[in-house]
Image (cartoon, rainbow, N blue to C red):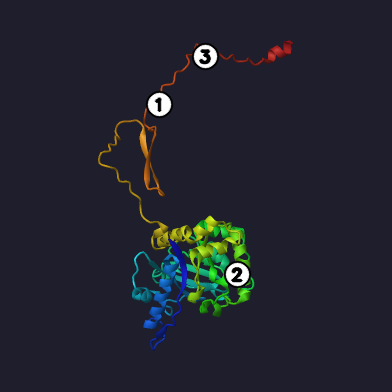
Amino acid sequence: MFFDLNVPITKKISANTSKKGKGTGNEALVSYSPAEIAAVEHRIDLQVHLGYTILSFCQTINKRVDPKVHVNVLNPLVALLRKRPGIVYLKRLNIILDQDSEKGFGLINANVTFFNSYDLLSLCPTTHNTFNQACLTHSLPSNLTAHIISLPSTLPRLPFHLKHTLIRTAIKNGAVFEINYVGSLGAEQEPTLVDANAAESGPAAKRNWWAATRELIRVCKGKGLILSGGCVVECDLRAPRDISNIISILGLAQDATHEASTKTPKSLILRAETRKTYRAVFSEPTVVLPEDSQIRSSVPGPVEQMEIDPDSSQVSVSKRPHEDSEPLNVPRQSAAAQPSKKKKKKPNKSDKSSS
């Protein structure tokens, strides 16, 4: 099971505004032509042939999210796609952060209903302050958690330093850092990223990608990384094994590269599902006991303590002494058998004066 969590979808939206222009009457009209649907279907068939089973369509927004203006263009697209057995479609929102986004970019509780229409949220910081916010603030568990941090690795130089403390804090909170292999080919980037000065194309961008990705792998120490595509043109798509071989050149172990495209994205999607629940909790676990088992709670004795192993889904029973049970009979030594301790007498003042 291989994942590609960055399948760019570029769609121009035609919006009808009301006469008053307050935004409450805005109605966005999203429609896909048969040619556009056929192009997406052909791309999906190619990725399935390469071995991908989980595909996440990505919509990119620059600077700030305004639900009155922006609309989810992925919902009508997924509804029109042909269902394939064993293939899962996800919806992802990518937000580009710049200096104008430092004071706020719409990721607030008032817009929760808009963000709940997406399965994944990701941030692309381009300044030092936005990178700090993405690692420290927006990676905390909440109903607006951004679990993916995508770096502008094709720029001539990263606009911020990759500090160990920020990286470790983001990984500890459950966030992951994305590596898009489209930069290693120097291929065409998504137009929205290019217009926002968050990505470049060409041989120079290819050289910048190798340097920035090597630094990211060194700071992360091979943990909290996912491999994605980000390819706009179909000829730039590569198989998962080929991408693992490319990333292993940068010093990442083979098992770590395999987990970056299988295990880590899977756990990421499970954590992203908790974004729609209270305080990132799935549900309260319950233990179902077989009918033949008998639990004697009235008789004091050893109490059975059940432990659940989440990986193997097995229940192990261990016995521990009951708190109310009688203490063990430990033989005590009699008073006669115990060695007597003689108390030392303190010398009186009269004895000192006579001497």
The residue lying furthest to the right in this view is 355
Contact check, label 2 and label 1, Cβ < 8 Å:
no
Classify mark 1: helix, strand or loop: loop
Q: Earlier in the sequence, mark 2 or mark 1?
A: 2
Question: Which residue position holds label 1?
Answer: 327
Classify mark 3: helix, strand or loop: loop
- Nearer to us in this view, 74 or 89: 89
Q: Give the residue at x 34% y 76%.
A: 80
Q: Is residue 282 above or below residue 8?
A: above
Q: CA distance from mark 3 to mark 1?
A: 23 Å
* Residue 18 in sight: yes
Q: Give the residue at x 59% y 68%.
A: 129
Q: Is residue 150 above or below residue 291?
A: below
Decide if residue 344 is on the left or right side of residue 277.
Answer: right
Question: Which residue position holds label 2?
Answer: 209
Question: Which residue position holds label 3?
Answer: 338
Q: Quadrant of the image for the C terminus?
A: top right
Decide if residue 258 is on the left or right side of residue 25.
Answer: right
Q: Residues within 10 Å of mark 2 (few under 14, many from 20)?
A: many
Q: Earlier in the sequence, mark 3 or mark 1?
A: 1
As shown in the figure, which amino acid type bears the numbered disc 1?
Pro
Q: Residues within 10 Å of mark 1 (few under 14, many from 20)?
A: few
Residue 6 disc label: none
Q: Give the residue at x 50% y 12%.
A: 337
Q: CA distance from mark 2 to mark 3?
A: 80 Å
Q: Position of residue 286 (x, y in %)?
A: 33, 48
Q: Position of residue 4 (x, y in %)?
A: 46, 67
- Residue 352 position by quadrant: top right
Disc 2 or disc 3, which is closer to the eye?
Answer: 2
